[in-house]
Amino acid sequence: MQSVGDWTELFQGTRQLPRALRDRLLGLASVLRFAKGQLVFGPDKVPDTLLFLVDGVIRVAQTSESGREIVLYRVEAGQSCVLTTACMLAEEAYNAEGLAETDLVAVALPRSAFDLLVAEEAVFRRFVFAAYSRRLIDLLRVVDDVAFGRIDVRLAGRLLSLAGEGAVVKTTHQQLAAELGTAREVVTRVLQDFQKRDLVTQTRGQITLSDPTRLEALAGSA
Amino acid sequence: MQSVGDWTELFQGTRQLPRALRDRLLGLASVLRFAKGQLVFGPDKVPDTLLFLVDGVIRVAQTSESGREIVLYRVEAGQSCVLTTACMLAEEAYNAEGLAETDLVAVALPRSAFDLLVAEEAVFRRFVFAAYSRRLIDLLRVVDDVAFGRIDVRLAGRLLSLAGEGAVVKTTHQQLAAELGTAREVVTRVLQDFQKRDLVTQTRGQITLSDPTRLEALAGSA
DNA sequence: CGGATCTTCGTGACATGGTCACTGATAGGG
DNA sequence: CCCTATCAGTGACCATGTCACGAAGATCCG
């Protein structure tokens, strides 16, 4: 297991700190690794540290009693995972969980160090508040989508964002359903429809966006 | 217009501060009043202060393009309204708005004073983080309800919480629909059903909970 | 009092989305 | 090559949202 080097360089909130403090942080924090698919945090695994994600992607999702699931947002490299701290601070129950979507490298900052930094360093404080704020706004977006959005529009949008630059999405209908908080059958139906309209083609476990432009248009029609 | 006296006594985050600092805060902050029904903040009214609610209730809701609405949470006396600061800090667009549900008395702390307090005072910092965390968790609850909850269950729960100690809720079907993010017709239908099952009685603009116990049971069946 | 008007509520027909119970299709491992 | 697990497709049905009305209080004013 190799070292991660100077991770303080990677974060908006630590990059601008004085060298001496950064060196202290390097000593205080511990490096964590998670394998793809591993649970990073969840109702039964409340962390007592602040997580900084150095490499990889964490998918934060909420699961219903009945087993349905909805993706709330993703934590990417260079961001911190504030939901964990939220719980830590509020000491309330919640039922969201973070799953390693890729292999992860993260830095865990003990609560004491977190408190210290927030107290002493304006830059770090801004970073933390901005992170909280971003998540709040992400959640507003989710509420809006779920409460008022049409499923075809949402699926089109999600396909585009999962495809990134390419035009291929490697996922199952089940996974797409979990992205949107709907049922697999619904995804199947909508994708059938997309196929008939020549927007996508499918094979088992893979969807090809054959007309991204029209998909964009559909996704944009809010 | 009378003065509010020493409002620093009212908040978890300021009560324990040293007397000298509290006196300074009393000087720095300004007292705001809003009449019932007035818009406290919204997409077109982004505040640049941190609001502490001294008296009254703010209803925070999100509105869709089509005009449907959903209540996200309520800010009560003794709490601060962090969504406003969230936007202030993230400088991102959002479409939630805060409406004065009663006449309000609030204290507006300028950003500079906020920064100072967060930097210097651990107590205040904890208060702010706890407030953020509570809202994050409130939103998780909303997502869960909207994505996975049944409308009759949600309505039963909301009726009980709106009734408080009493057994009468003075609202229109339209307003209840806005609470839950659904359509008026749906509320009408569900209430008809409740009525047939002798759970409630209705007159124009008012619903009486005739069997709170069974309503609780219904609401509790997640 | 008796309309004119506004708000609230009720209702039926239909569209969309979620659930259930299956069947069929495909990939990979012995 | 067959077995099995996973993935996808389908039809029936229920729950919820939308649309287009009309009816039943409330309010105002002559």
Image: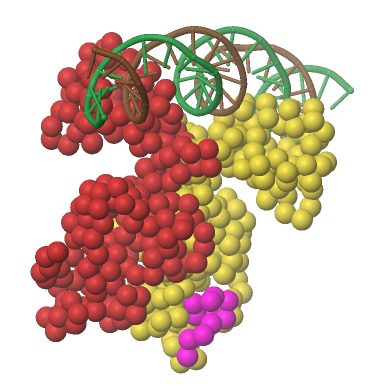
Chain colours: A red, B yellow, C green, D brown
Quadrant (top left, top right, bottom left, bottom right) of the C terminus of chain A: top left
Residue at point 19% right, 80% down?
A27
Q: Nearer the viewer, residue B114 or B192?
A: B192
Relative to C14, does residue A5 appear above or below in the rendering? Answer: below
Quadrant (top left, top right, bottom left, bottom right) of the N terminus of chain A: bottom left
Residue B206 image position (x, y, % from top left): 75, 39
Q: Is residue A101 magenta?
A: no
Q: Nearer the viewer, residue C15 or B83?
A: C15
Left/right placement of residue A172 relative to residue B168 reads left
Query: How many numbered circles does the render carry?
Result: 0
Left/right placement of residue B201 relative to residue C6 reads right
Residue at point 48% right, 86% down?
B17
Residue B20 image position (x, y, % from top left): 46, 92
Left/right placement of residue D30 relative to residue B45 reads right
Span colored in magenta: B8-18
Q: Nearer the viewer, residue A49 or D18?
A: A49
Residue A156 image position (x, y, % from top left): 29, 27
Relative to B194, does residue A137 appear above or below in the rendering? Answer: below
Q: Is residue B12 magenta?
A: yes
Residue at point 11% right, 65% down?
A2
Q: Is residue B95 visible?
A: no
Relative to B30, does residue A46 appear above or below in the rendering? Answer: above
Q: Nearer the viewer, residue C9 or B145?
A: B145
Left/right placement of residue A32 relative to residue B153 reads left
Q: Is residue A6 visible?
A: yes
Q: Quadrant of residue B217?
A: top right
Q: Quadrant of residue B86?
A: bottom left
Residue B61 image position (x, y, % from top left): 50, 47
Residue at point 50% right, 42% down?
A64
